[in-house]
Amino acid sequence: MPLTANRPKPMVPVLGRPVIDYVKDAMVAAGLSQIIVTTGYQGEQLVSHVSTWDSQSRVNQEDSPMGTAGSVKLLSDELTETFVVGSGDSVASFDIVDLLDAHRNSGAKVTMALWEVENPTEFGIVGLSTENKGEIDSSLSEGYIAKFKEKPTSEEAFSNLINAGLYIIEPEVMDLVPEGEKYDFSKQLFPDVLSRGWPMYAKTVNGIWFDVGHPFELHNAQMALIERRDELPFPMPDGEVLPDGSFISSSASVSGHISKSVILEGASVNGAVVDSVVMSNSRINGVSESSIIGENSVVDSRILNCVIGDGNHIVIDLENDRR
């Protein structure tokens, strides 16, 4: 919030594309034959968007929130062979073919993509071993999963590898998910699989990974995509990349100062924008620092560390001391 007031999180734009498209592209590149999007909140937008994909894609909308695993359980009749689950609200460069090879070679029931972070205390961490049910070896970047821990303290952290939200799963694993209940992959299903001694494998991915659940990660993700545009398989929108890594859409109008920022289609800047993202058709007539401005908004003041939703007008009335 407030960027999700008018859209579900997978539809938040990243370089002019809904974030869900980045995971979808990785699945298409791996040759997956069918993509099903499970959703609840504001699912109508996803139905409309997914209809623009190929005919093998569709949306399964929940009547009530079922959790990450519970929503997939609803599709059990269709999940009769190895399948891939990806989070629709992260920007990532997954080599799913490589993960599928690791999954098959390990004989695992579940294989998980991992990402390495400096500070694991805000995430769910994963400890790896060279063998199933073995001892944790913190030097490993891939191996059998030996232990999970949600949001550890610095003292509790036995690993800096975190769950990156992409899984390869065998159909029989879903038999462990209760019918008709809200159920979570990372908090409930995967610890259950591990406790049964079923082999679970994991491999650290290269490239980029950003969880856009935090609004300011939208800025970091887009700056990283721009920086690595020549090596990552995604389409760049039309526009100019400045020497400092900023991006200005070809349909944007800029007559002010831009630094380390992203100015998307139809936006205009007549002031200064620093370390910010200005989404489509918004206008900056003041100063934006370290902020995210949603679509169709106007900023006629100075803002710092702000997240502005769609369709807002930000102005300071100095005479009456009102905003």
Image: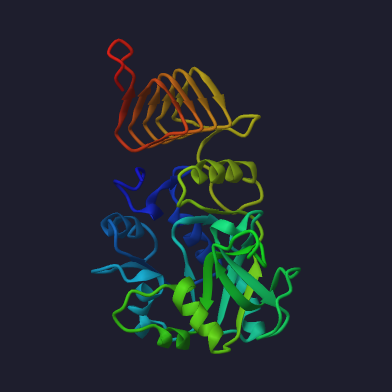
Residue ranking furthest to the right:
139
**308 shown above or below 24:** above
- Point out residue 76 in the picture as x, y percentages from the top left corner: 37, 83
Residue ranking furthest to the top:
319
Quarter of the image that includes the C terminus: top left
Kindly identify the residue that appears in the image at 34 percent across and 48 percent down. 4
The colour style of the image is rainbow
Q: Is residue 257 left or right of residue 299?
A: right
- Point out residue 128 in the picture as x, y percentages from the top left corner: 67, 74
* Image quarter of residue 312: top left
Q: How many marks?
A: 0
In this view of the protein, which residue sits in the foreground, 309 or 228? 309
Q: Is residue 256 left or right of residue 39?
A: right
**232 shown above or below 261:** below
Residue ranking furthest to the left:
63
In this view of the protein, which residue sits in the foreground, 305 or 49? 305
Q: Is residue 110 left or right of residue 7?
A: right
Kindly identify the residue that appears in the image at 26 percent across and 57 percent down. 44
- Point out residue 87 in the picture as x, y percentages from the top left corner: 46, 63
Residue ranking furthest to the front:
155
- Point out residue 148 in the picture as x, y percentages from the top left corner: 57, 73
Q: Is residue 137 left or right of residue 199?
A: right
In this view of the protein, which residue sits in the foreground, 107 or 197? 197
* Image quarter of residue 43: bottom left
Kindly identify the residue that appears in the image at 49 percent across and 42 percent down. 216
**146 shown above or below 43:** below
**Can residue 134 be seen from the camera position used here?**
yes
**Can residue 82 be seen from the camera position used here?**
no
